[in-house]
Image (tube, rainbow, N blue to C red):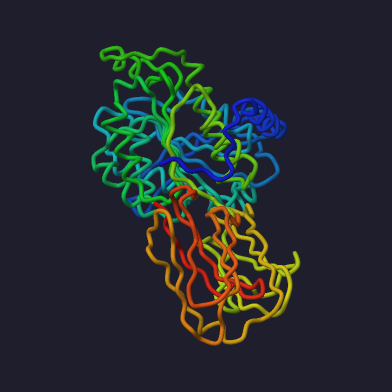
Amino acid sequence: MFVLHNFSTMKNIFLLLSIVLISEISAQSFAVGHRNVIYIDPSRNNRQIETEIYYPANIAGDNVAIAQGQFPVISFGHGFVMVWSAYQNIWSALVPQGYIVMFPRTEGNTSPNHAEFGRDLAFLIGKMQSEGTTANSPFFGAVGTTSAIMGHSMGGGASFLAAENNTTITTMVTLAPANTNPSSIAAAANVGVPALVIAGENDCVTPPAQHQVPMYNGLSSSCKTYMEVKGGGHCYFANNNFNCSFGEGTCTPNPTITRAEQQDAAQDMMSLWLAYFLKGDCPSWESFGDSLLASPRITSQSTCLFPPPIVSVNANVLTSSPAVTYQWMLNNIAIPGADSSSYTISGIGSYHVETTYYNSCIYSSSAVVITGLLENASAFTFNILPNPVTDVVTLQWNSGSISPDAVQIIGINGVVIKVQQVTTGNSTQIQVEDLAPGFYMVQPLRNGNVLTTQKMIKQ
C-alpha cells in the first residue's frame, strides 16, 4: 500500500520542488572537518572502536573546530571487507547540509561479527551525544538531539541490529542492506523507528527479493518506505572499491546506470528524508512524497501517513484521531492546558486541534463550529445498518429526549461529503452507492452540533 499525506502527483512540479528544496539545503552549506578518534565501550570489556568523524566546519581540514550550531548525528556502517573511505560520497553529501557523520572502522576483516558491529553503530550515537555535553570535548555544545543509524550492505544489515529495540535513535536509512547473522530480517520486527530502505533494482550481490524486501516487510514501524533505484546495482551506492566491485563482477544482472546516477537518486531521497526526521524541515516531507510518486528514476512503496487530524464529537467532548502531541484551539487561540487527545467543550466558538507526529511539524484539523452546548446528548446512541454497506444505509437511534435533525457523512480527509435532513421518526436512510470504497464517519446533528460519531465502511 502506498499512502502519503498531501503528496501531489503533478509531475510538472516535481523538478521545481526538488530544485527549491536542494537550493534551501545548499544555502546552509558547511565545510567538512575530520577527526580520527578511538572510543572505548566499557560495557563490552573496553572494546576499542576506531572511528572516522566528519562534521560541519567553517574551514575544511583535520581537527579543525566544529561550526557553530547543533547538528544531528549519523552513524554509518561500511560493507563487507570495505573501508570507510569508500563512502566519501556519503559524507561529502551530508556534512555540508549540517550533519555529523561517524564511520566505525571495526569488523573490516573476512570474518566480521555482525552483532558487535551493530552494537558499535548504536554506541557511537550515544557517545557523540555525550560528547556534546562534555565541556572539554571538541564537539561540546554542537550535538543535536536527533540521530540516524545508516549503513551499506553488511553495514545496512547491521543497522537493523543496531536499531532493534532501540528507542534512542530517531530514524534508520539503509543502502542495499544485506541479511546478517544474527538475522537482520528477523530483527526488523523489533525496529519501530521510521525507516527508509533503498535498494538497487539490478543488485546481484544482495538481491532485493532475498534481502531488502523481507527486511522492509518485517519492519514494525508505522512509517516505512522502500525505494528501488531503476537499473541500480549493489556497489554503486559507494565509491569505487575493489573488493565490492570484484564480488559484483562475478554475478548478474549488472547495473545499467552509472555510479553517479545511482548515487544522485539515492542521495536526493535520503537528504529529504533526513531533513524531515532529523531537522524538522516540514516542506521536505511533501517534496519527498512528490519525488516518490513522480521520479522516473525509482520505484517505491510506503506506509507513511501523516494526515491532518480528524476531530469527532460525542456530546460535549471533542476527540482527535491518534497523534503524538495535541493542542486544542478555540477561535485560533491555544487553549491553556488542552494538550490531550480529547477536550470537553467549554463554550461556543470554532474549535480545531493541532497535532505532531515524529517531529515538531504541525498538522491541523478542520474546524468544528459549536453554536451551543448539548443537554442530555450523552444519552444519544445510534446504529448503522448494514455496516459495511454497499448502496443504502439505515441509521436507527434510540427514542430519548435528544433526536437529530440532520445527518452528515465525512471522508477520512475531514471533508463533508453528504448532508441529509431528518424529519420525523427514529431512523433515516441514505443512498451511498456513489461513495468510493473506504472508511467514512457518520455524524447525527442537532441544531448544527454533532451528537456523536461512528465509523462506516463502504464496500
Q: Identify which residue, 212 or 187, lies in the foreground.
A: 212
Q: Quadrant of residue 243?
A: top left
Residue sitting at x 65%, y 77% = 345
With 133 as the anchor, is 211 left or right in this view? Answer: left
Residue 104 in view here: no
Quarter placement of the N terminus: top left
Please state the total of marks drawn on the protein image: 0
Is residue 118 depicted above or below 386 in this figure? Answer: above
Is residue 254 depicted above or below 341 in this figure? Answer: above
Q: Position of residue 430 (x, y in %)?
A: 50, 61
With 1 as the anchor, is 54 left or right in this view? Answer: right
Residue sitting at x 59%, y 61% = 419
With 359 as the anchor, is 221 left or right in this view? Answer: left
Is residue 428 depicted above or below 189 in this figure? Answer: below
Q: Identify which residue, 97 or 141, lies in the foreground.
A: 97
Residue sitting at x 65%, y 31% = 17
Q: Position of residue 56 (x, y in %)?
A: 63, 36
Q: Identify which residue, 22 or 78, lies in the foreground.
A: 22
Q: Position of residue 177 (x, y in %)?
A: 35, 33
Residue 282 in view here: yes
Q: Position of residue 15 (x, y in %)?
A: 63, 25
